[in-house]
Amino acid sequence: DAKTTQPTSMDCAEGRAANLPCNHSTISGNEYVYWYRQIHSQGPQYIIHGLKNNETNEMASLIITEDRKSSTLILPHATLRDTAVYYCIVKGSSDMRFGAGTRLTVKP
Amino acid sequence: KAGVTQTPRYLIKTRGQQVTLSCSPISGHRSVSWYQQTPGQGLQFLFEYFSETQRNKGNFPGRFSGRQFSNSRSEMNVSTLELGDSALYLCASSLIGGAWYNEQFFGPGTRLTVL
């Protein structure tokens, strides 16, 4: 019961923006949306998080819909090193539950 | 600042044995969480420790246990190993843990193979 739904896989051309969607229709008002990614054979890496406002950092942007039932992670200029599994997680006060994630493949 | 370290990185055991994995969190972090990752089940939460107390527990059998020391270092133990316990075991640390917003930093993992 990961509480999020993501596409299994996506492809993106190098240099283009990668837009990764996530549905979290049962999110509670005080639960955050987190994004992590995991590059093969490494531990997951934090990317960004948000509550209800859009967020941007040096790695990515997070767009959360007004009803908070879905969000999109945007990698503005994808590189080959962004190839990884991307996890969208909804978290409140308890533990962090990971879903299956989206396998993003950036192609030259 | 050093990241989360886990030892050993690789481990091979046989069925029925027991194993202890170690995790050193980032300096100043008081919460340590453990996860199991397998190709079939993905990343699954095992348990979280904060100030030497288990605060949250995932849906794993009692063969999986852990503890945290006063310096925040944590160990997890798996007894009576089964073939299905073969996995990458990840440790993550955070400043306070369990809060509404809480960024976790993951270690490289220990890859356990049970023969």
Image: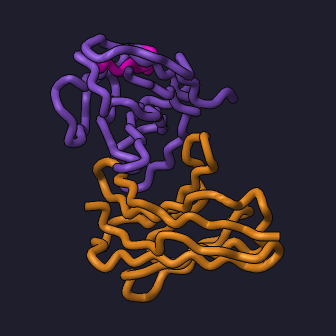
Chain colours: A orange, B purple
Q: Is residue B79 visible?
A: no
Q: Is residue B74 magenta?
A: yes
> Percent from the top left, x then y, of residue B38?
41, 43
Identify the residue at the far bottom of this view: A66
Q: Reply above or below: B88 against A34.
A: above
Q: What residue is drawn where x is 69% and y is 71%?
A: A75
> Percent from the top left, x then y, of residue B54?
25, 29
Q: Which residues are magenta?
A: B71-78
Question: In the visual, does A7 lie left or right of B4?
Answer: left
Q: What residue is drawn where x is 83% and y is 70%?
A: A108
Q: What residue is drawn where x is 52% and y is 31%?
A: B109
> Percent from the top left, x then y, of residue B94?
48, 38
Q: Is residue A15 magenta?
A: no
Q: Quadrant of the N terminus of chain B?
A: top right
Question: In the visual, does B50 lie left or right of A53?
Answer: left
Q: Reply above or below: A103 against A19.
A: above
Image quadrant in which you'd find residue A22:
bottom left
Overall secondary structure of the magenta section: strand
